[in-house]
Amino acid sequence: MSIKRPVYPPFSPLNELDLVTGFYGVQESRALYKQLLEENAWPDNHYEVDGRRFELPRQQTWHADPGIRYSYSNNLLQTRPWTPLLQSIRQRVERAAGARFNSVLVNLYRTGDDYVGWHADDEPELGQAPLIASLTLGASRTFAWQHRDSHEEGRMKLHSGTVLLMRPGFQHHWFHCIPRDPDIREGRINLTFRKVIPQE
Ligand SMILES: [Mn+2]
């Protein structure tokens, strides 16, 4: 396992991402992908918000410690308990990140047609400067970021078994996305570990 800073565009001020390569080995990553794909009860990806029906371009589940609520997920998703598998991954990610997490958003990008558009994970419940740890299993996908003000852009490939640490400040300064890639026919499962701060 090694931690390295991704290659940024020249003179980039970006120093809020760290990539942990080889967090899981190739075989273990493949086994974990398969196990999650099979054992996770993936919900239908059609939702209704304010009477409007829409289709999420991926499938998601949300798992959290008891009592943890997250407005994003509560609008879309039921909160599920941790499975033994997710617990064991969480413990290992916490050691690498040097932080504790009380929730995980699990995303399945079934093919390269699934994606997530430009956004920041900046809901108030995540606090002012969240650390988010993002584990990739399965197909490699491009992760892109763009500065909110300067619109400076960068991108890198996230390969199976890597953990991307989005450090405090990243959500505040940058948007990010996983663009569509029609050439990719394999699935990717992405686990983003978060610390939701209980609201009064
Ligand atoms: Mn995100």
Image: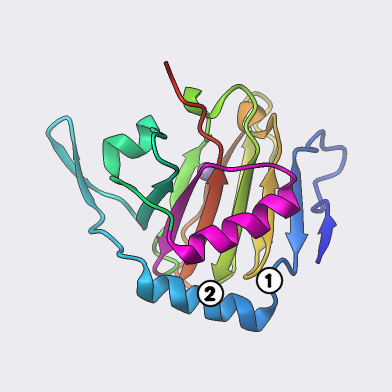
Please report the residue visible at 47 percent of the width from the left and 64 percent of the height from the top: 84
Q: Is residue 115 magenta?
A: no
Residue bearing the label numbered 1: 24
Name the residue type under label 2.
Answer: Leu
Q: Nearer the viewer, residue 167 or 14?
A: 167
Q: Can you identify the residue that label 2 sits on?
A: 32
Query: Which residues are drawn in magenta?
Result: 83-110
Name the foreground residue: 28 vs 139: 28
Residue drawn at x 75%, y 45% is 98
Q: As drawn, is 44 to the left or to the right of 188?
A: left
> Which quadrant of the structure image shows residue 13?
top right
Residue 73: image location, x then y, percent: 35, 39
User: Which comes sooner in the sequence, label 2 or label 1?
Assistant: 1
Q: Nearer the viewer, residue 86 or 179?
A: 86
Residue 51 placed where, x, y %? 12, 33
Look at label 1 and name its amino acid. Tyr
Is 80 drawn above or below residue 158 in the view shown?
above
Residue 7 x, y percent position in the rendering: 82, 53
Asked if residue 194 shows in the view, the reply is yes
